Amino acid sequence: CIKLLDWFKYRDHMCLVFRKYGLSLYDFLKKNKYRPLPLSQIQKIGRQLLTAIYSMHKLSLVHTDLKPENILLEKTNYGIHQEKKVPIQLQMESLQFDLNQYYHLNQTDIVVIDFGGATFENKHHTTIVCSRPYRPPEIILGMGWSYPCDIWGVGCILVELYLGFTLFDTHNNRQHLAMMEKVMGPFPHSMSNISKKYFESDGKLSKPQSEDELKSLERVENLKRLKDYFHPCHKSFFDLSCKLLEYQPTKRISAKDALSHPFFDFSIQNDLFEPIIGIPEC
C-alpha cells in the first residue's frame, strides 16, 4: 500500500503528499494494446495484491474498489520486445495482437491506492460498492458485503491480466449475472432464491424485461466457461481463480488462505513464450 509522506491544506482542501509512482496496471495494459501478462508476472502481482488485502483485512478494513486502475506499478520499468511469438495462453485464442513490438515489464512491484471508499467492517456499509466489472454477485443481489468482496475483485483482476480483457465488461445487472453464469456456471439456490427480480423459482435467470435488456444479453453468447480460457498447463492458476471467484461469499477463499495456495509455490521461470516447467499437471 502507499505511504503518506506529508499533508497540507490549500484553499480549505486537505492535500495528501505521496511519492511518485508508475503507471497503473490498466494504463500499462492499454499501452501494451491489452496484451496478456506472462504467468510469472501474474504470480508476482497476485502475491503482492493478496498480501496487501490480507494486511487491510487484519485491520478490519475493506477496500471496496479494487480494479487495475487502483493498482500502480512502483516504477514504470519496461522493455520493448520485438518477437513474433505470443504468451502461451494466447495460443488457444484467435485474438490479434501486434506481434512486431510490445512492452514487457522489467519490474512488477505494485502498490494499492484509492482508499476513498474503504470501509471498516464495524462501520456503516453503503448498498453499492465496487466498480461494476469487479462487483461480486452478493452486492448485485443485495445480500450485503464484507471482506469477500475484495477477494472477488482480486480474482477478476488476475484473470484480466491473464486474458488481456475485462471478464465481466457490463453496466447492467441482468447482463452481469448472465455473464457470471455463462463463465462460472449456475448460481446456488441459496443465492438465486434471494432475488425474484432476477431469478425464476427454479433458480434460472429470469427473462429480460425490456428490449434493451434483451440486446444486452446478446453479448453473453460470446463468453466461454472459465476453464476454456485457461491453458491446460495452468491448472493451478485456474484452481486459484475459481476459489477467488466463488459465488458464495462465505465459501470464497480468504486472502490469508489464498496466499497459501499451491499456485504461489511454483517457481515460474521465463514463461513468456514457453509452457510452464515443473508443474506436475503439465
Image: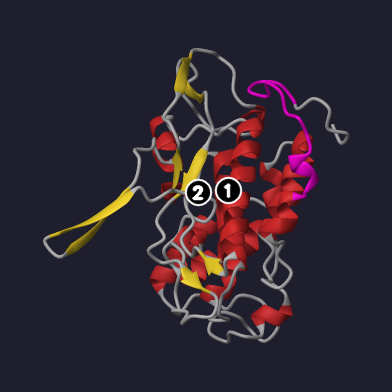
User: Magenta segment: does it hold 233?
Assistant: no
Task: Please name the amino acid that badge 1 sits on.
Answer: Leu
Q: Quarter of the image holding residue 118?
A: bottom left
Mark drawn on residue 192: none
- Location of residue 124 with respect to 29 vertically, above or below: below
Distance Cα–Cα, label 1 vs label 2: 18 Å
Q: Quarter of the image holding residue 53?
A: bottom right
Task: Please name the amino acid that badge 2 sits on.
Answer: Thr
In-image side of 183 versus 140 (left or right) = right
The answer to whether residue 197 is visible is: yes
Mark drawn on residue 49: 1
The part of the chain drawn in magenta is: 260-275
Q: Position of residue 142 (x, y in %)?
A: 53, 81
The answer to whether residue 102 is visible is: no
- Location of residue 155 with respect to 178 vertically, above or below: above
Residue extending furthest toward the left: 11
Q: Position of residue 238 (x, y in %)?
A: 73, 46
Marks 1 and 2, the one that precedes in the sequence: 1
- Location of residue 210 with respect to 216 vertically, above or below: below
User: In terms of depth relative to the viewer, which is nearer, 150 or 208?
Assistant: 150
Colour mode of the rendering = secondary structure
Q: Which residue is mark 2?
A: 166
User: In terms of depth relative to the viewer, which is nearer, 256 or 8?
Assistant: 8
Helix, strand or loop: magenta stretch: loop
Which quadrant is the C terminus positioned in?
top right
In-image side of 202 versus 197 (left or right) = right
- The residue mark sitting in front, 1 or 2, is 1
Crowd class of label 1 (few under 14; some 14 to 19; many from 20; radius 10 Å): many
